[in-house]
Amino acid sequence: MRKRNLILFAGALAIAALAAFVTRSWWTGGGASAQGPQRARVISVELAKAERKPVPVDVDAIGTVTPISSVALKSRVETTIVSVHFEDGNKVNQGDLLFTLDARQIDAQIEQAEGMLARDQAQLEGAQRDVRRYSDLIGKGATTQVNLDNAKTQADILIGTIKADQSALDNLKVQKSYTTIHAPFSGRISAANVKVGNFVRPADTVPLAVINQMAPVYVTFAIPQRVLVDLREAMAAGESRVVATIPGHQQSEQGKVAMVENSVDSTTGMVTVRGIMNNERETLWPGILVATKLIIRTENSVVVPTVAVQRSQNGNYVFVVRDGVAKVQPVKVDRTFQGTSVIAEGLSGDENVVVDGQLLLSDGSRVEPRARKTGA
């Protein structure tokens, strides 16, 4: 009985082994031949053209807007404010009347000086008549030379007195001119720090008001010393430009380089540059910080979208597609500009580069282009 069971168990194992062999042969033989050879995987990617075009060579920096002219108005005489002729914060033109000061005391002094001048002029006329009369009499022997000399001396004294009187009168008129304060240039005025009736004097530390020139204005910023030579060459050729933009806004102003500081800061390696902007719309306000772009020159360069450039341990590279195959192309990136990378080496322009789908690619992968995504 035991022997019979062993024979049956061995037969069952043989049948199971035969079934497994037949099944494996079907899957490896007949099944594979039914499906045919497997196709190579094709990856869908997004492409863009590498192109050669003019690209500015620029330097970004943070700048400060400063007025070309700024004046703090102060009184040059001790008196009181009679009138204020402007609205706080308004634009003023050169020559506009801004303040009128009390001039009554100076007016009285001017009248007094004019009276003294008139008196001395009358005395000079009398002395000159005496000189003429004594000159006639001495010719007739009717007077002495001493009388004539005394008359001439008196006339000379009165001439000097009249010059002093005239100088005193002119000085008073200058003092009178200080009682009306006019705008020395066009610009925008601050709030008035004094009102009608306030007493002012030259020793006051707080100005009556401040005028800042608004157009044009300066934009001052710092650049690395490595671009100083290129900047000076561009200035000599008249190619340099400055663009100042208010952060968070699209408003900007363009201008040119007005001045480069005569020394480099040895602690930072930076040099101060000053640009002059027309600012006719008063976009730039004195004291604000702006994003400045110093455009040194324009070069004809090969550019690709920055998203096409990949990085590895061996450096930067892009995937170039030719005949449906993606190839790794090492590149050297010189700089970036407005979402594009300037390629110094590796591309000649007009190549198709992959800008989306690089994670699935390797050197030699087959690809098919797809339509570029557009904003909804």
Image (cartoon, rainbow, N blue to C red):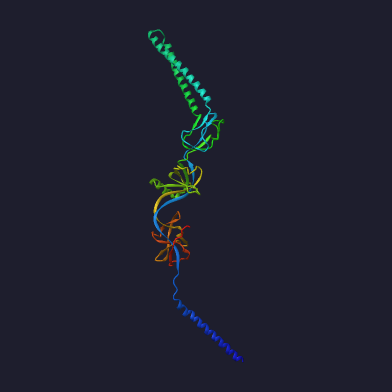
Q: Where's residue 80, x and y in %?
A: 55, 29
200 left or right, relative to 311: right
Query: Is residue 157 in sight in this rendering?
Result: no
Is residue 203 placed above or below 50 in the rendered structure? Answer: above
Q: Residue furthest right?
A: 1
Q: Where's residue 275, x and y in %?
A: 45, 44
Q: Where's residue 151, x and y in %?
A: 43, 13
Q: Quadrant of residue 338?
A: bottom left
Q: Where's residue 32, x and y in %?
A: 46, 78
Residue at 45% x, 78% y is 34
Residue at 50% x, 21% y is 111
Query: Is residue 51 in sight in this rendering?
Result: yes
Q: Quadrant of residue 340?
A: bottom left
Q: How many marks?
A: 0
- Camera-side residue: 144 or 357? 357
Q: Quadrant of the N terminus?
A: bottom right
Q: Residue furthest front?
A: 376
Is residue 197 placed above or below 120 in the rendered structure? Answer: below
Q: Quadrant of residue 39?
A: bottom left
- Camera-side residue: 4 or 66? 4
- Camera-side residue: 218 or 305? 305
